[in-house]
Image (cartoon, helix red, strand yellow):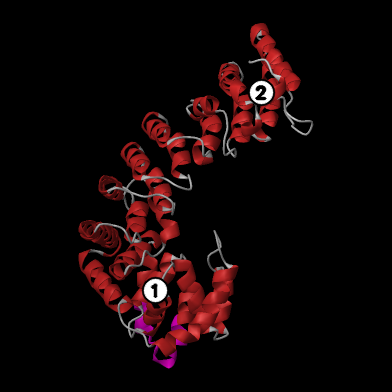
Amino acid sequence: MHDQTPGDRPGPQHPYSRARLNDLVRRIEEALRSGDTALQSKLVLQSAELLTKRWSRLPPPDKPAFDALLVTLCGQIDTAARRAFAERLAPLRLGPPSTAQALARDASVAVAAPLLAGCSCLGDDLLADVAASGGAGHRRAIASRPSLPPPVTDRLVRHGDGRVAVRLLDNPGARFSESGFAGLIAHSERAEAVTLRLALRPDLPAPHWPTLLELTWQRATDALEADLGNDGAARLLAQATETLARPVAEDRVARFRASLDVIGSRLTGPHRGPNASQLERWINLNRIEDGLAAIAHAAGLPLPMTVAAFDAPAPATLAAILRGLDHPWPVLKALLVRRFGETLSPAMVDEIWTLHRRLRPGTARRLIRCAAMPMGCAAFLDEAEADDGASNGAGP
């Protein structure tokens, strides 16, 4: 470290005196010579305390040497200490660059992730390099950064798995090149969660759209044929597509909007809809607006599509939506009674009961996704990753 001159001595309010910095450097050097790992870890955390009060206020001539000393020290301490130091460095707008880069490349995801996910002093070249050479956890951390340019996302898409692709597509700050979109299309062939998220991208190049529709149709068809056979699959898919596309008058939809606003504000995260008993109670109390709004919210369907399914003369699409939500038969039956009243014949009940019994929830979700996607809707988006683990396109 450089000796201080009177001209660059900090004033009395400056938190970093030359004596304090020199003392810290001396103790770090002694700890490195001694091999005392406990002391080394303690000094790392003391250094973090110093740095978090603003690296920029350290004497500029001392920064490179202090940074190099920290890199050496971090190479000696255990994972827990490196992680604690990385967590303290991550929020800094300006920090010791070599130390931050070394920790961002750390083989332990627990150490590297806090920096990779948000440290602003890491450059795009380093991020792209770690995206290619790091592990899956490193890539997922990078994919969470608030801003990601195409050179970085290209590497993440090329070297990452479906979960990285899902995280990127859920990140509004991620931008993609044409090459990146092509790579995401390749991921979508293996992961339904990627397919659905790509369908929601307004910047998706138009030539890729038919591929998404074909993938969604194939997944739905395969699952339906496994559950219902070839004839039943084609008929149900055609009926659902026609039903969800059916226009609904705005004044009819408006009746449900207030309920949807209330439900949407109260039910978020893993609780996207009321439980089955609550929904059944609403329906039996003739609170149809609340019931259909809750179903629309939980399924990720626009209100007009949900109302169209309820209003349709054939209830198969409505039954598929309820089955996709994995609600039990009494909920669906209560809804059918409210919709059809005295016209609900035993034959209709038998037909829908058979459909409810034979159709698996995952198959029902794929059916509704396929029927809704041509209208720009990715239904049951939250359940897509659970269906295929964001890693394959197999049946549920």
Q: Per the image, is 388 magenta?
A: no
Tell me, for residue 319, which label it has, or none: 1
Tell me, for residue 44, which label it has, or none: 2
Between 141 and 239, the residue placed more toward the observer is 141
**Amino acid type of the residue tagged 2 in the rendering:** Val
Please report the bounds of the magenta region as a residue range: 336-353
Q: Residue at x 57, y 28 (%)?
A: 96
Residue 261 at what x, y percent from top left? Answer: 54, 75
Q: Which element is circle 2 on? A: helix
Q: Residue at x 36, y 50 (%)?
A: 175
| Left or right side of 123 for 284 | right
**Amino acid type of the residue tagged 1 in the rendering:** Ala
Nearer mark to the viewer, of 1 and 2: 2
Residue 300 at what x, y percent from top left? Answer: 43, 67
| Left or right side of 2 for 170 | left
Q: Quadrant of residue 310?
A: bottom left
Q: Quadrant of residue 161?
A: top left
Quadrant, the N terminus? top right
